[in-house]
Every structure is written in C-alpha cells, then in structure tokens.
Amino acid sequence: MFILKGIAQLENAIAKAKKLRPRVEFDHFGRYRVSGSKGYYTVICKKSDNNYKTVSCTCKGAEKGLVCYHAAAALSLHIGLARQQQTA
Ligand SMILES: [Zn+2]
C-alpha cells in the first residue's frame, strides 16, 4: 500500500502501464482488477480517515510499498470516474 501524494510519483508506473497495457476491469468504485504477469491483481483506491488517498494492490511490489503499474492503470480509471461523480 502507498499514499498517493501527487501524479509525479506515478510517472514511472504510468510509463510502464502504457507500455504493457494491462487490462483494467471495473469491480465497483474504488476497486479494480488489473491483469499482470501472473493473473489478475486487485487494486483498491480509497480515502483514509485523515483524508490521505491510499492505493493498495495485491502484487508483490505493492506489498513492499512500491508504486506498481497495476495501481497506475487502475488509478487512471479511478480518477476519471471520480471526476465524473464530482461533476454529476
Ligand atoms: Zn500491483
């Protein structure tokens, strides 16, 4: 799990996601399934009680606190959906 502080920390992961083009499946708002090298990983995006945005993924990299490309791929969908909700 990591705390999302800004888009800059996602740059490398986004670049990797663009290259690998994982499949992102919408489960429900804040929860996505992203294809990876060993099947699907679950990415959960949420706001913690103290208003931090946290992102967790079930892959090995994210377990160590790394920003993985699964999270980046899911976040690009999540941010788009969150914007739609705000403007709805
Ligand atoms: Zn991951």
Image (cartoon, grey):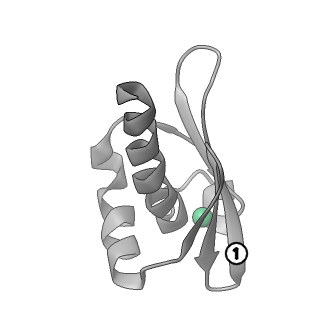
Q: Secondary structure at mark 1?
A: strand
Picture quadrant of ligand 1: bottom right
Name the kind of residue labelled 1 in the image: Tyr
- Viewer-closest of 66 and 74: 74
Outermost residue on the front side: it is 88
**Residue in view at x 52 percent, y 24 percent:** 52
Can you say whether 58 is above or below 52 in the image?
Answer: below
- Asked if residue 32 lies left or right of residue 24, the reply is right
**Residue in view at x 39 percent, y 38 percent:** 84
Q: Position of residue 3 (x, y in %)?
A: 52, 36
- Viewer-closest of 84 and 58: 84
Residue labelled with disc 1: 40
- Asked if residue 44 lies left or right of residue 66, the reply is right
**Residue in view at x 30 percent, y 70 percent:** 15
Local packing at callout 1 (Cα closer than 10 Å; few below 14, some 14-19, many 20+) is: some
Can you say whether 23 is above or below 84 in the image?
Answer: below
Q: Can you tell which quarter of the image residue 41 is in? A: bottom right
Q: Can you tell which quarter of the image residue 76 is in? A: bottom left
